[in-house]
Image (spheres, grey):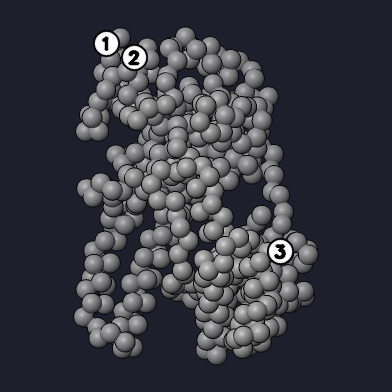
Amino acid sequence: MLVLEFKVRAALQQRKAIDEAIRTSQFIQNKCLRYWMDNKGVNKYDLNKYCRVLAHDFKFANELNSQARQSSAERAWSAIARFYDNCKRKVPGKKGFPKFKKNCRSVEYKTTGWQLNLETRKAITFTDKKGIGRLRLVGSYDLHFYQPEQIKRVRLVRRADGYYCQFLISINVQIKTEPTNKTIGLDVGLSAFYTDDQGNKVDHPKFLRKGEKKIKRLQRQLSRKQKGSNNRKKARQRLSKAHLKISRQRKEFSKRVAYSVIQSNDLVAYVGVACAKRIDLKIKNLVKNHCLAKSISDAAWYQFRIWLEYFGRKYGKITIAVPPQYTSQNCSSCGKTVKKSLSTRTHFCGCGCQLERDENAAKNILRMGLSTAGHTGTFGLEPINALGELTSTLTGAILLGQVDSLNKESHLTSRSDVR
């Protein structure tokens, strides 16, 4: 699924209509969640049927397109299904019981309720009773490359700097590239954004730290405004734009670095970050340390992982998430466990190995990644994310040489509570 986003040019009345459609979508989503709470045994199809009842009982709900109402019900069911899945897998701690939506920012249409201008492909008209009408699309993407039937969903999104229209296109993008005959192991951290198995580093851009002074000033200005006033709304808008800029900077940096890593290597092994799997490094637990929470959030490790996996699928490269347990504690030369605190940044071992802590972890990550290339579920907990199959670039002297040298080292334990 490919997502193309355009900024929309809309009049004041149209912006109000979009806001009303978003509020209606939020209302339907919350009503469906309440219906599930009050009625035992409700499933996804019951929520879709309940949308018709809401349209009959509420005039403003009937004004929204029927498939847009179903999309709102599907959002509610997505939260419910995730809760059921966490209960089945016996996830420790909170299971993520569904909550009512407080600040909804988008409304999603399926294949009806909108009509794209087939001549210019630079305008879209929404035909339901909300009165949104014709919106002009501003962006560099060309929709002429795709057939109208490939557009499965259209989403209107409200952000701090305006309104956007997203097109979800059903297409599988696969680009063939020349093999590089290289592999890489990556360990993320706070001293550097990532460190590879050769000791190369990429520094943290620290966008939040750099923009922190401006954000604090805008927060002080917001706190001085009277609640409910127009000046407070304007101050909140300025603060939201500052946060949005930092978010976009962080996203573009992760995207650029991930693209560079994928283009330069045939196999990328990286530490598993922030998934629900027990073998992954959970950001939710790490940010409980109030001394490091801001730096960890600003690092955006999980966003980097998402882009690595996306570009890996797109360019046919192998990306493997390796469990983080003991990757920093074990010696990459002899395999012996050398316990060290988080403040100890250099790895010393009795075998004579002396490396920086993150470089030692990156070597262990690469070794474990190579040992599972082309396989899934080799760590005994949950399947490791190995995208694609073992290509010819990894079956020659490069892969054989690296695997043979790494197999001479002792096997690392994959399950532990210490990293």
Could you say where residue 210 lies in the image, as x and y percent from the top left? 28, 57
Q: Residue at x 34, y 45 (%)?
A: 285
Closer to the camera in the image, 51 or 72: 51
Left or right of 116: which side holds 198?
left
Q: Residue at x 66, y 84 (%)?
A: 56
Q: Residues within 10 Å of mark 1 (few under 14, many from 20)?
A: few
SS class of the residue under badge 3? strand
Q: Residues within 10 Å of mark 3 (few under 14, many from 20)?
A: some
Q: Residue at x 61, y 63 (%)?
A: 42
Could you say where residue 186 lies in the image, as x and y percent from the top left? 44, 33
Q: Residue at x 69, y 48 (%)?
A: 173
Closer to the camera in the image, 384 or 117: 384
Q: Which residue is mark 1?
A: 350
Q: Amino acid at mark 2?
A: Lys
Task: Check if mark 2's residue and mark 1's residue have beta carbons within 8 Å.
Answer: yes
Residue 31: in sight, yes or no?
yes
Q: Which residue is mark 3?
A: 152
Q: Amino acid at mark 3?
A: Lys
Earlier residue among tags 2 and 1: 2
Q: Which mark is residue 336?
A: 2
Q: CA distance from mark 1 to mark 3?
A: 60 Å
**Closer to the eye: label 2 or 1:** 2
Task: Check if mark 3's residue and mark 2's residue have beta carbons within 8 Å.
Answer: no
